[in-house]
Image (tube, rainbow, N blue to C red):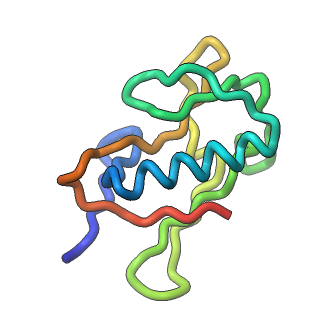
Amino acid sequence: MGTKIRTMRPYVELHSSIYKPFVRKFVKQVAGRKIKRVASVAPFGACFDATTIGKTIAGHAVPIIDLVLHKEGVKWRIYGANSMVDIGKNVECLEFVDGGKNIQCVLAILE
């Protein structure tokens, strides 16, 4: 069984069994940074008040996401500039969405 990483869409789809705990952990970590959550904007499930998100040289000051690849120690690190999407009206959303139960997916780890 393999994993597919799609690059044709402006977001990453994860299997529901991974998406749900991933988003819970992400939301918990951003809350610790005093980032305010706002109503979700489809298809995104986790959206935030952009005025409460700090900036760094690597983009938004949100948790770094590591996609663990085929070998131990091999990962694709995603910083705030590439993990958040500007929806407008001071709303930024996590660029990961629930792809359902039939999608093959990657495992995301937050640091």
The percent coordinates of residue 75 (x first, y second) are: 52, 74
The furthest residue to the bottom: 72
- Is the C terminus in the top left, top right, bottom left or bottom right quadrant? bottom right
The percent coordinates of residue 93 (x first, y second) are: 55, 32
Residue 12 is left or right of residue 75, and the answer is left
Residue 35 is left or right of residue 87, and the answer is right
Name the residue located 33 percent from the left edge and 50 percent from the top edge.
16
The percent coordinates of residue 88 (x first, y second) are: 58, 16
Frontmost residue, 62 versus 38: 38
Residue 11 is left or right of residue 72, and the answer is left
Count of labels in the image: 0
Name the residue located 39 percent from the left edge and 48 percent from the top edge.
12
- Is the N terminus in the top left, top right, bottom left or bottom right quadrant? bottom left
Name the residue located 50 percent from the left edge and 24 percent from the top edge.
40
The furthest residue to the top: 89
The percent coordinates of residue 6 (x first, y second) are: 30, 53
Placement of 55 over or under 91, stated as above or below: below
Name the residue located 43 percent from the left edge and 66 percent from the top edge.
107
